[in-house]
Image: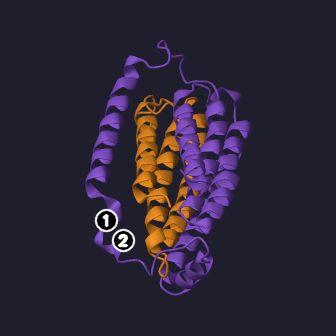
Amino acid sequence: MSVEQIIFYVFAAMVLSSALFVVATKNLVHSIFLFFITLFSMAGLFVFALADFIALSQIVIYVGGVLVLMIFAFLLSNKQILDNPKPMRSRFLGIHHLPGIFVALVFFLVLIWTISLVDIGQLQWVKESQENTVKASDNTIHYIGINLMTRYLLPFEVVSVFLMMALIGAAHLARKERKV
Amino acid sequence: MIPLAHFMFVSAALFCIGIYAVLSKRNAIMILVGIELMLNAAILNLVTFSKHDKFEASGQVFALFAIILAAAAVAVSLAIILNVYKYYRTIDPTKIDNLRN
């Protein structure tokens, strides 16, 4: 087992265990801060998929933008939003969690079954992509930049306009109502 | 070199954790976190297969688009959650059951 594989499995275990804690813990602030760890380890997994630019934008946008936005939304709003809506009678796993657990487990089994059926390493286009495979020494940002400005120019512009519209809309929704 | 299937196992597990959070949480912000987990699982799949698409890099480009759209979705939905909280004094989605009046 090489060092690369060990680090990959450490990152994967961090992603899955912190995601499990995020959904298992009752404390909202704890779960948000654990979500930090999940997103950082996801960036590590992106690096192992040889997508360093995506890993960086994951850190900048998700960790720097989305999570800080969530924490601001808590801290600037009322204190009661942090409390649970209603104290649950049941402890860790109550009866009302059972449908969710059941659906998630069944879906997980279906996904695992499908993935193991496909045998992805032997797919035709994966096997034919010897020239086209990213090596660890390649500069992927170069190709991303070229494609973003040629092939995906229209989606890029649409996404930028959409992002501006969404942020203006969010600021409009979240503003304080003027007292009449 | 890590096989592609291992990335997909991690992604499948993360997606199912997100489904559990969306289905069984009684708090709108935790549902939002579950949606983010599911989006991250999808982005991991895109990025994984983009390893075999060096010159077009379509997986990575669409992963970028997905990250941007997720950021926009979080901004808008947090604003909506705050407004809902101001109006109903709760963010339990099971209690919010009327559209207008």
Q: Given the image, on which type of amino acid does mark 2 rest?
A: Val
Q: Quadrant of the C terminus of chain B?
A: top left
State whether discs 2 and 1 lie on one chain.
yes
Q: Position of residue B38 (x, y in %)?
A: 46, 48
Note whether A29 is above or below B67 in the view shown.
above
Q: Give the colour chain A carries in the figure.
A: purple
Q: Position of residue B57 (x, y in %)?
A: 49, 76
Viewed as shown, does residue A71 lie left or right of A121?
right
Between the residue at mark 2 and the residue at mark 1, the CA separation in whole angstroms equals 7 Å
Which residue lies under the disc numbered 1? A122
Instruction: Please tell me which residue is depicted at 49% across the width and 18% down the height of the picture.
Output: A92
Chain under disc 2: A
Q: Position of residue A96 (x, y in %)?
A: 38, 22
Chain under disc 1: A
Instruction: Please tell me which residue is depicted at 40% across the width and 47% down the height of the picture.
Output: B12
Residue found at the far left of this picture: A117
Q: Given the image, on which type of amino acid does mark 1 rest?
A: Gln
Which residue lies under the disc numbered 2? A126
Note whether A176 is above or below A144 in the view shown.
above
Q: Position of residue A15 (x, y in %)?
A: 56, 43
Q: Secondary structure at mark 2?
A: helix
Q: Give the colour chain B carries in the figure.
A: orange
Residue found at the far front of this picture: A1
Classify 10 Å Cα crowding around label 2: few (below 14), some (14-19), many (20 and above). Answer: some
> Do residues under tags 2 and 1 come within 8 Å of each other at their CB atoms?
yes
